[in-house]
Amino acid sequence: MNYQQTLAYLFHQLPMFSKTGSTAYKADLSNIIHLCKVLKKPHLKYPTIHIAGTNGKGSVSHSIAAVLQTAGYKTGLYTSPHLKDFRERIKVNGEMCSEEFVINFTQQLKPIIKKINPSFFEITVAMAFEYFEKEKVDIAIIETGLGGRLDSTNIIIPQLSVITNIGFDHVQILGNTLAKIAYEKAGIIKQNTPVVIGECVSETKKVFDEKARENNAPIIYAQQQKKVTEYFYSHSSLEIVIENINTKQKKEYITDLTGIYQTKNLLTTLCSIEQLQKIGWKISQQNILDSLRKVKPLTNFKGRWQLLQTKPTVIADVAHNEDGVKEVLKQLKQISFNQLHIIIGMVKDKDVSIVLSLLPKNANYYFTQSHIPRALPVDELFSMALNKNLIGEKIDNVNSAIKMAINNANNNDLILVFGSVFLIAEINNL
């Protein structure tokens, strides 16, 4: 098989959550354990960091990777889903794995795939583990796909675990209370291994404290260590002043991840780096400052409050659940623009009604959809939006929607595209 044939095999022959939803989710670790046994346990041959969370895990993963790369470490990074190219999931120092590796790995494992029928995600996790060993990385950052306890990534023995936050997402799989969701995410907490918690509330803190106690794991709450005292936003950078709560010392950081929600992610990132320094990773303050300014080019990170053009301003963001959308709306209140144009498309298994109820009534709307089986059909989204008094146009394709919004907008207007990772993936000039 060539590369395109290999991708077709992976995308169409294997159960894929991004396409079909929960029917592709396998709630046990037997397949990934079997796959890694066949591959001679590559995931145990280099140090790892494990990252889970409802929102922010992609930003924190990429930020930590940027810091480690800048400090001189060959850094593997496994994330999901991809936006444009399957190989975005598996990177070393920001470079995607080769097409040849994807072909050879898939060909090698075909007999095993036929035998145990793994999911798409299980195969990609095993592929990442193998690639990082082949590339002899100094360290790999491994992001969970869904949950934590039963996520295929949860066979690693990390040096550090990180949980960014807990919110209502994938409730049909992870549970319908914050405590139940926290229990699943807390499954990545390992014996005697420090864990950094980005954000928590009393309901989730109890769960984390208990799990950490069971595992004798030092637990660090970022909110108790540091706080943001001020920040300054521009379309190209975000300046953030952070105070150490214990010492009262303040430091300024500049990041090219410009969503204001990145202020929370930065606290998690900095606390995680401090833990890495404590266990022997040589990372200087200058490494941190330099890397945060260029997380995007260092790691090839896209889709988070990403500026696509100006006059009118067009911004794309992968916000797709209640908490993520609330953060995006919070940011809108702090930006100057004339008229707001919102392009939205969602998937069926999100709480679409709650998201729509959060949106401003006075924006110009363009309802659309991505082109995967999981996508909520545009007619259904349009009908649900009308019930929330959101008025706009129906457009089948996100690029046509962007073109229409640009034609309707003045230079000082803002066009925001969000609602699904898969919608953002279909934007042509991302």
Image (spheres, rainbow, N blue to C red):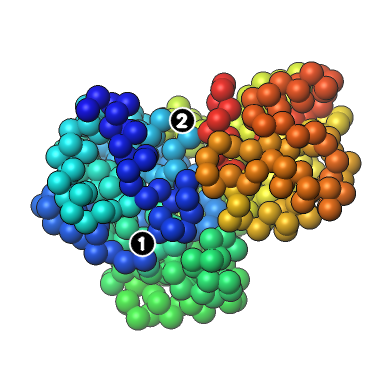
Kindly report the distance in space between the C-alpha atoms of the residues bearing marks 1 and 2: 25 Å
Q: Residue at x 28, y 53 (%)?
A: 118
Please state which amino acid type lies under the numbered disc 2: Lys
The residue that disc 1 covers is 26
Q: Nearer the viewer, residue 12 or 338?
A: 12
Q: Nearer the viewer, residue 46 or 78?
A: 78
Q: Residue at x 83, y 36 (%)?
A: 392
Circle 1 Cα neighbour tier, 10 Å, few/some/many (<14 / 14–19 / ≥20): some
- Compared to residue 389, the image places residue 92 above or below, namely above
Please state which amino acid type lies under the numbered disc 1: Lys
| Left or right: 155 as drawn, with respect to 207 | left
Picture coordinates of residue 362 (x, y %)? 89, 41
| Left or right: 424 as drawn, with respect to 142 | right
Looking at the rendering, in which quadrant would you find the C terminus?
Answer: top right
What element does badge 2 sit on? loop
- Compared to residue 28, the image places residue 256 above or below, namely above
Of marks 1 and 2, which one's residue comes earlier in the chain?
Answer: 1
Q: Residue at x 54, y 75 (%)?
A: 179
Can residue 80 be seen by looking at this rendering? yes
Q: Residue at x 21, y 49 (%)?
A: 113
User: Circles 1 and 2: CB distance less than 8 Å?
Assistant: no
The residue that disc 2 covers is 84
| Left or right: 176 as drawn, with respect to 213 | right
- Compared to residue 6, the image places residue 44 above or below, namely below
Q: Nearer the viewer, residue 62 or 125?
A: 125
The quadrant where residue 364 appears: top right
Can residue 231 be seen by looking at this rendering? no
Picture coordinates of residue 81 (x, y %)? 44, 43
Q: Which mark is residue 171?
A: none
Q: Nearer the viewer, residue 419 or 400?
A: 400
Picture coordinates of residue 79 (x, y %)? 40, 44
